[in-house]
Amino acid sequence: MSPTYEGRTQDASSPILGAGWWKKGAAIAGEVVGEFETTNGKCYQIKLDKPATVNGNQEKNVAIGNLAGFNMALQAAGIGHLEPGDKIKVICSGFTQTGKGTPRTDFSIQVNRG
């Protein structure tokens, strides 16, 4: 008999840590458990080591994605993207004016793969 798989959208749902959530010094750490596409690009789901407060709720799972500073930090780390199983630490290191009206959120990223 072949195996049966079941899943629910709610089990994979995670609040996205958009630019508005980040403040200088804010940090998260955890394990990448998946990824999904949005209209703005790829997001990575992260199971946090310690819950984070998002919209007044303590969240154990969050998503982070298509923020220019985040993608730039991944490129600077020499990896360009995250993979399930990666252990990551992300710290907001500040903001840079881009001349486009909204400052870029800057990050320091540490990834342990393998």
Image (cartoon, rainbow, N blue to C red):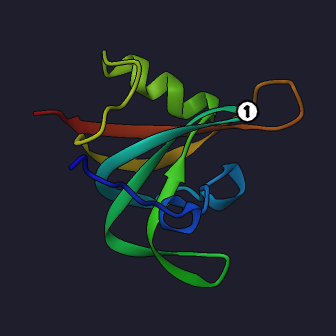
Of 24 and 14, nearer the camera is: 14
Q: Is residue 76 above or below residue 19?
A: above
Q: The residue under label 1 is which amino acid type?
A: Asn
**Image coords of residue 15 (percent x, y):** 60, 63
- Identify which residue is drawn at 35% across, 38% down: 109
Instruction: Tell which of 39 and 29 is nearer to you.
Output: 39
Along the line of sight, the residue nearer the viewer: 108 or 19: 19
- Picture quarter containing residue 27? bottom left
Task: Assess disc 1: are there few (<14), some (14-19) or many (≥20) residues with their C-alpha within 10 Å of its C-alpha.
Answer: few
Residue sitting farthest toward the left = 114
Q: Position of residue 5 (x, y in %)?
A: 36, 54
* Secondary structure state at the residue bearing disc 1: loop
Q: Quadrant of residue 29?
A: bottom left
Residue at 84 percent of width and 24 percent of height: 99
Quarter of the picture holding the C terminus: top left
Judge from the rendering whether residue 22 lies leftward or rightward of residue 30; answer left or right: right
Residue hosting label 1 = 40
Provide residue 80's location: percent of width, then percent of height. 40, 18
State the residue at coordinates (31%, 32%). 83
Residue 10 horizontal side relative to residue 50, left or right:
right
Locate residue 80 relative to residue 64 in the image: left or right: left
